Amino acid sequence: MNKEIDIKYSFEKKAKVMEMGSEDTKQYEEYFDKNILPEIREIERRKALAREEAYKIRISACLSISKKV
Amino acid sequence: MIVEKIYIKVADDYDKLFKVIPEYYLSRQLVSEIKQKLSKNIRTVLVEYPYVDKDYRSTYYGFYAKRHRSYSKFCYRLHFFDQIVKKYFPVGMDNSYLGSIVLRPTNVASMGRTLLSPAAINDFQGYICEALFENNIIGVPFKINTFPHIMQDTDVTVCAHAVCWMIARYYSEKYSVYPERLLYDIADAVKDVSRGRNIPSRGLTLGQISEVLTSIGFYPEIFVRELYPDHDFFYDILYAYVESGIPLVAGMRKKEHAVAIIGHGPVSLAKTKFKTVQGMRFNNSRRLIDSLIINNDNELPFSSLRNSISDNEKYCLEDVDAFVVPLYEKMYLNAENVLNFYHGFVYSDLLNIPERNYVSRIYMTSSRSYKRELICDKSINIDMLKAQIELPMPKFIWIIELSCYENYDSRKADYRWIIDGTANQYEKYPFLFLHDSEKMILYDRALAGKLYSYTFPESLGPYKIYMSNLKGENL
């Protein structure tokens, strides 16, 4: 009884299906490969470095003791 | 029980608290801060004693009871009202209740769990993360919408613990998925003690803060400013989480301090601001905000963290050089990725966005809240509304809103794009929904896996921006 229900969206009738990698999306994909992908690699490097740095950054017990709050 | 009722006409009336409360619960310095920072609308303070505060009790049983010097088990609790409370039972005064401050017998840093409404703070203006709390005064329930606050006790907890407690208590009160953690549990949450004993505390590293938050059930991400050649971009990332209504732990290495960033101050008019500051094509909405709202455990809640240092304030945004953001498990795609890739939708032929200057507002929200707001929005095109409601979305979504200056100033957006919060960072098509004035592009990622393009019968106009992540007053 694993029948999947075929869902129809209200916009589907008047919508056009776009193929990824077709002429419709080619320019976007080229832009992504050229401009966005290199930056993603840099972001991933930063994420890993941040985890290493995190154990070197100590937030000490700062209280305005002079204020004797 | 209520041991004293103090009527406030002038700030010096707070000195009457010393007649009831011993100085090891309430220092002169704290009263001076209360006089300066609390709203002049406060008319009555009820003093409750003995009050059993579960957070203080956790540190009492775990630490203070072990000291040679004796400490009381009990706390005082102050309740604030903006009207004169005449009756013994303050029944029917819900609208006048502004919250409470617990006072611990710790001598140093005695301000315990504090639940003060932003309305209790003098001239407060801003938008903050708020949860609904309930206090009971001699059996009468009182509700307060606020973000919780506590002071470090310098024995068991330091500023970083206090900030983790604030964030943990906010989430446990707001969402049942998060457990309540008492103060001692938070201080004892660091399991790797190779760097020294946990208690008495000598401060925490950012990594340990992340461990504490993980132990509570969060999935934290860490950001360190020195890894960003463009420091502005680091603050844009921080701001995207603030705008998402996610409170975060901000670390200040030079000041050796941590604070909770919980919201932002008033929003300037884009048309005026970008007249003086040269606007770019996409101007992050952070540039329209001069201050963030912080809970600094050394002060009463809801202080401002300005972009640059001012006379009366000790800290400014530049002091924040790292932060930890406590995320929900299924928030995979982070703000940095979204800020990086959204330009791609504009600078290719996927969409047709007119060449002019825009304010860009980037934030995360739950698809449930988003759809709940959307369905009530009468300013939005009906085809676009229905398509977004029908489209299956993950629990959390990133949203990019673009508004031209005049529309932003009237809280309207020209374009709003939705990104899958669970998408992989390398995906070319991480979006669910994009649109320009003529068409919308929908990506049914969950079921059909198809990309649809739908042309609107008429060109689209602007619609209301989404504003449910933070709660604001006096704006």
Image (cartoon, coloured by chain):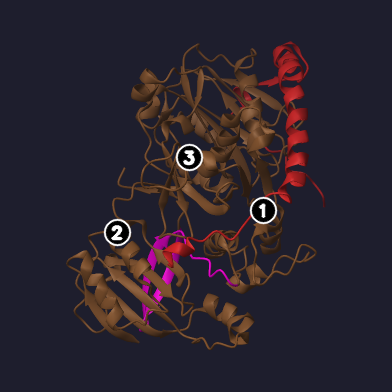
Chain colours: A red, B brown
- Say if labels 2 and 1 share a chain: no
Q: Secondary structure at mark 3?
A: helix
Q: Mark 1: which amino acid?
A: Arg
Residue B54 sits above or below residue B423 on the image: below
Residues at circles 3 and 2 in contact by the CB criterion of under 8 Å? no
Q: Residue at x 38, y 72 (%)?
A: B27
How many residues crowd mark 1 within 10 Å: few (<14), some (14–19), many (20+)?
A: many
Name the subunit of mark 2.
Answer: B
Foreground of the two, B68 or B101: B68
Q: Which mark is residue B374?
A: 3
Q: CA distance from mark 3 to mark 2?
A: 42 Å
- Residue B107 x, y percent position in the rendering: 46, 76
Name the residue carrying label 1: A58
The chain that hosts pointer 1 is A
Q: Which secondary structure lies at badge 2?
A: helix
> Which chain hosts label 3?
B
Q: Looking at this rendering, what residue extends furthest in the right direction? A: A1
Residue B217 higher or lower than B27, as above or below: above
The answer to whether the residues at label 3 and label 1 have Cβ atoms under 8 Å apart is no
Mark 2 and mark 1 in contact? Answer it, CB < 8 Å.
no
- Residue type beneath disc 3: Leu
In the image, is residue B344 above or below residue B284? above
3 or 2: tag closer to the N-terminus: 2
In the rendered image, residue B147 lying in the magenta stretch gets the answer yes
State the quadrant of the N terminus of chain B.
bottom left
Residue B80 in view: yes
The percent position of residue B397, horizontal first and vertical second, equals 61, 40
Kind of residue sitting beneath label 2: Gln
Q: Which residues are magenta?
A: B131-155
Q: At 62% from the left edge and 27% from the top edge, which residue is drawn?
A: B230
